[in-house]
Amino acid sequence: MPANPPGAPGVAARVRRWSRSFMRGRKPETLPVRLDRRRIYIVPTRAGLGYALLLVTMLAGALNYQNNAALLLTCMLGAALAASMLLTWRELHDLTLRSLHAEHAFCDMRLPLQLAFTDDHRNRQGLSIAVDELEQPCPLRPGASRASVTVATDRRGWMAVPRMRVSSTLPFGLFRAWGWITPAQNVLVYPRLLADSKPPARNDDPNERIVGGDEFAGLRDYHAGDPIRHVAWKASARHDHLLVREFDHAAPGQPLRFDWDALTGIDRETRISRLAGWVCDAYTAAHPWILVLEDHRALGPASDAAHYHRCLAALAELP
């Protein structure tokens, strides 16, 4: 029998999760958030541990053979190790997250977050930010103290920004310094897109139709001059007079209508995703549309970006 069942986290992962519960930054904080000396953690990396072991070996050899040159070299390398630890710690010291702005993203896609830090005229080239275990390089330069990261999404609606780990291993990769930031901010995730069916091809309002199109509209009595090919012979045989098939089409520029009640026989989330897909298709085609929600509230008609985001936000906020 295996020590860990399939899919169970390893010992290192469990220890890492357990240790995080004792670290600062667990509760959401209002921005700005500053990483001071009490919020920065630093430990040697594997390379740092190997380097330290090498120094211990060199020190033992230099003392054993009373070699002053080897002892001086060991002390210089030890000083470089201590300086490396200080420089790594300074990469994070006084780093201040000033604001956070979320872009737009659909469910199951990664949501971009724009982070703005206070410009303290320091060069922080080794910074990286880890969100949901994905570490993303975010170097900062004087005058350009902005970074961008992405967050995984798994459901629509409002989502709390997850805790972010800011870390660095510069200058030599011998130490890793990190700190936690948990912004007290929510972001809106748009519904999952479902474009497996075509949106309504026409507007069903008879007052917004033009006679003479190619879409069947119904039957009417025959009038002198009507084309013979439009006569509905089978339908006329059941009546005492001739009937003619009438055709029309939607007037140019008339908005499409995406109605919640028009989608039946599918579950709620699929209905929301299909409406979101239709909204995206209409926006891409620059065709005006009307979105009718579950509470019969109608949005539109329009085809601009503001209407596009208003419709997707309304779908995302549905209970």
Image (cartoon, rainbow, N blue to C red):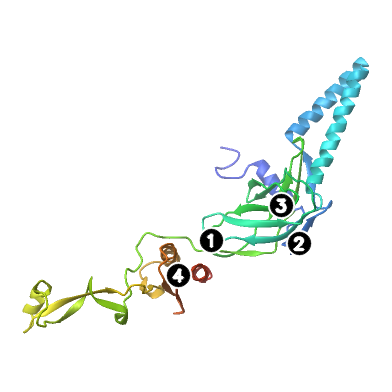
Q: Which residue is mark 1?
A: 155
SS at circle 2: loop
Q: Identify which amino acid the numbered label 3 is placed on.
A: Ala
Crowding at dot 4, Cα within 10 Å, few <14 / some 14-19 / many 20+, comes out as some
Q: Which dot, 4 or 1, sits closer to the camera?
A: 4
Image spot of residue 61 (x, y percent): 87, 19
Left or right: 178 in relation to 251? right
Q: Which badge, 1 or 2, comes first in the chain's sequence?
A: 2
Image spot of residue 186 (x, y percent): 64, 65
Q: Quadrant of residue 256?
A: bottom left
Left or right: 26 in relation to 316? right
Q: Which residue is mark 3?
A: 144
Q: Identify which amino acid the numbered label 1 is placed on.
A: Arg
Image spot of residue 68 (x, y percent): 93, 19
Are circles 2 and 3 on residues that touch, CB within 8 Å?
no
Q: Which dot, 2 or 4, sits closer to the camera?
A: 4
Q: Residue at x 32, y 79 (%)?
A: 208
Are circles 3 and 4 on residues that touch, CB within 8 Å?
no
Marking on residue 93 = none
Are circles 4 and 1 on residues that touch, CB within 8 Å?
no
Q: Which dot, 2 or 3, sits closer to the camera?
A: 3
